[in-house]
Amino acid sequence: MLVHVTLMRVFCSIVVIIGQWVSGPFSMFFDSTVYSYEL
């Protein structure tokens, strides 16, 4: 049971790191697209 909880924590941390790595450039691309659309 303890191993399962540890794996879940590691999995959640990996998901958070990948989510931040993906959403960073995507949010910049989205902001630039909205900015160019407003122009």
Image (spheres, helix red, strand yellow):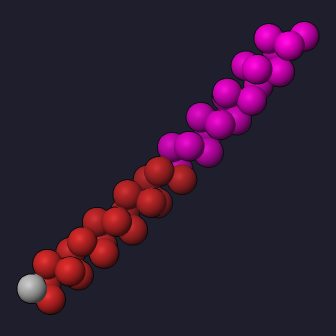
Q: Is residue 9 above or below residue 26?
A: below
The C terminus lies in which quarter of the figure?
Answer: top right
Q: How many marks?
A: 0
Q: Determine if the magenta segment contains residue 31.
A: yes
Farthest residue toward the left?
1
Task: Please tell me in which quadrant of the rendered image residue 9 appears.
Answer: bottom left
Q: Residue at x 62, y 45 (%)?
A: 24
Q: Determine if the magenta segment contains residue 11.
A: no
Left or right for 11, reference 21:
left
Q: Is residue 31 above or below residue 20?
A: above
Q: Position of residue 3 (x, y in %)?
A: 13, 84
Q: Residue at x 67, y 28 (%)?
A: 29
Left or right for 3, reference 26:
left
Q: Position of residue 12 (x, y in %)?
A: 34, 65
Farthest residue toward the bottom?
2
Q: Residue at x 38, y 57 (%)?
A: 15
Q: Residue at x 9, y 85 (%)?
A: 1
Magenta stretch?
Answer: 21-39
Q: Position of residue 35 (x, y in %)?
A: 83, 21
Q: Is residue 13 above or below residue 17?
A: below
Q: What secondary structure is the magenta-colored segment mainly?
A: helix
Task: Please tell me in which quadrant of the rendered image residue 14 appears.
Answer: bottom left
